[in-house]
């Protein structure tokens, strides 16, 4: 069984190849393509692979545009750094997605599912079309993002506009911190719950303990081992956020959106 990777971040692509070798050593990677343009040329000149791994956001566009031009019958495992609300609609029969950094257990399950489809000679072209339709309707999905959060301050509730929130953090309890460095307790059990309510173009899950607003970022500095240190605007400049080596490429791409 052979597979194709469409990924514009070289380091991420290499790590995906290594992870595939660990969880599915029988899977042969026949090519790694860095852009929509090179993928279109490749599909015009080569036979369809058994399985495709495709990043959603590429430097020259979204990978869905590739599948609008080529009607493919094999399964596609999409990878993305953006946990968009509309992604829930993408997980249709025969098509899977993985959030970066890719978890190896999830990768193994996705590949096993793809193998079942290939062995059954299942045609998932219709599923890809559903995914494309879900992408086109993502504008309506964005209306579900929260515009206000209620913060607990001295036994009273304070409504805070989403644009006034600099970051969310986990410190025993979940807090939101405003652009004015005001801190409020939130009535949510996990940051995962909060993350699903946020527009991913505006907020980024930096690590297990923090979700940051792009408008609160002052500057980003490189650290050892390819990690990143995020400095926030005053008066939140004393709070530094660390981005791991694995998430650094997706964070840079998020900043450029």
Image (cartoon, rainbow, N blue to C red):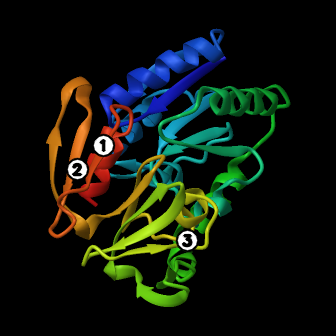
Q: Give coordinates of residue 212: x percent, y percent.
A: 35, 61
Left or right of 205 in this view: 71: right
Q: Outermost residue, top direction?
A: 25
Q: Which residue is mark 2?
A: 230
x 61%, y 67%: residue: 134
Q: Are marks 3 and 1 in contact (CB under 8 Å)?
A: no
Q: Which residue is mark 1?
A: 242
9 to 170, vertically: above or below: above
Q: Give coordinates of residue 26: x percent, y percent.
A: 66, 9
x 14%, y 68%: residue: 234
Q: Are marks 1 and 2 in contact (CB under 8 Å)?
A: yes
Left or right of 161 in this view: 24: right
231 to 105, vertically: above or below: below
Q: How far apart are labels 1 and 2 at the CA level?
A: 6 Å
Query: Toward the viewer: 230 or 53?
Result: 230
Q: Quadrant of residue 227?
A: top left
Q: Give coordinates of residue 209: x percent, y percent.
A: 45, 50
Choose the circle earlier in sequence order: 1 or 2: 2
How packed mark 3 is, by other alpha carbons closer than 10 Å (few <14, some 14-19, many 20 or more), is: some
Q: How far apart are labels 3 and 1 at the CA level?
A: 23 Å
Left or right of 257 in this view: 198: right
x 54%, y 72%: residue: 186
Choose the circle earlier in sequence order: 2 or 3: 3
Query: Toward the viewer: 7 or 23?
Result: 23
x 17%, y 70%: residue: 235
Query: Toward the viewer: 66 or 112?
Result: 112
Choose the circle earlier in sequence order: 3 or 1: 3
Residue 86 seen by the camera: yes
User: Which quadrant does the N terminus fall into?
Assistant: top right
Q: Which residue is mark 3?
A: 197
Q: What kind of element bears circle 3?
A: loop
Q: Nearer the viewer, mark 2 or mark 3?
A: 2
């Amino acid at each position: 069984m052979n597979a194709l990777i469409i990924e514009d971040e070289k380091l991420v692509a290499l790590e995906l190849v290594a992870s595939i070798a660990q969880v599915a050593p029988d899977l042969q990677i026949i090519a790694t393509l860095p852009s929509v343009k090179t993928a279109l040329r490749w599909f015009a000149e080569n036979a369809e692979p058994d399985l495709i791994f495709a990043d959603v956001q590429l430097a020259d566009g979204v990978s869905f545009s590739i599948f609008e031009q080529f009607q493919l019958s094999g399964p596609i495992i999409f990878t993305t750094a953006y946990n968009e609300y509309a992604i829930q609609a993408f997980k249709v029969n025969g098509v899977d997605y993985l959030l970066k950094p890719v978890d190896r257990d999830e990768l193994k399950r996705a590949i096993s599912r793809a193998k079942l489809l290939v062995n059954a000679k299942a045609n998932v072209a219709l599923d890809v079309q559903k995914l494309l339709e879900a992408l086109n309707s993502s504008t309506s999905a964005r209306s579900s993002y929260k515009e206000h959060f209620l913060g607990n301050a001295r036994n009273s509730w304070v409504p805070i506009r989403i644009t006034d929130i600099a970051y969310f953090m986990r410190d025993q309890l979940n807090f939101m911190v405003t652009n004015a460095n005001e801190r409020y307790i939130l009535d949510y059990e996990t940051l995962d719950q909060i993350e699903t309510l946020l527009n991913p173009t505006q907020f980024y899950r930096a690590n297990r303990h923090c979700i940051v607003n792009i408008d609160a970022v002052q500057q980003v500095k490189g650290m050892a081992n390819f990690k990143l240190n995020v400095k926030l605007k005053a008066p939140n400049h004393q709070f530094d956020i660390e981005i791991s080596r694995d998430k650094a490429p997706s964070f840079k791409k998020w900043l450029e959106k």
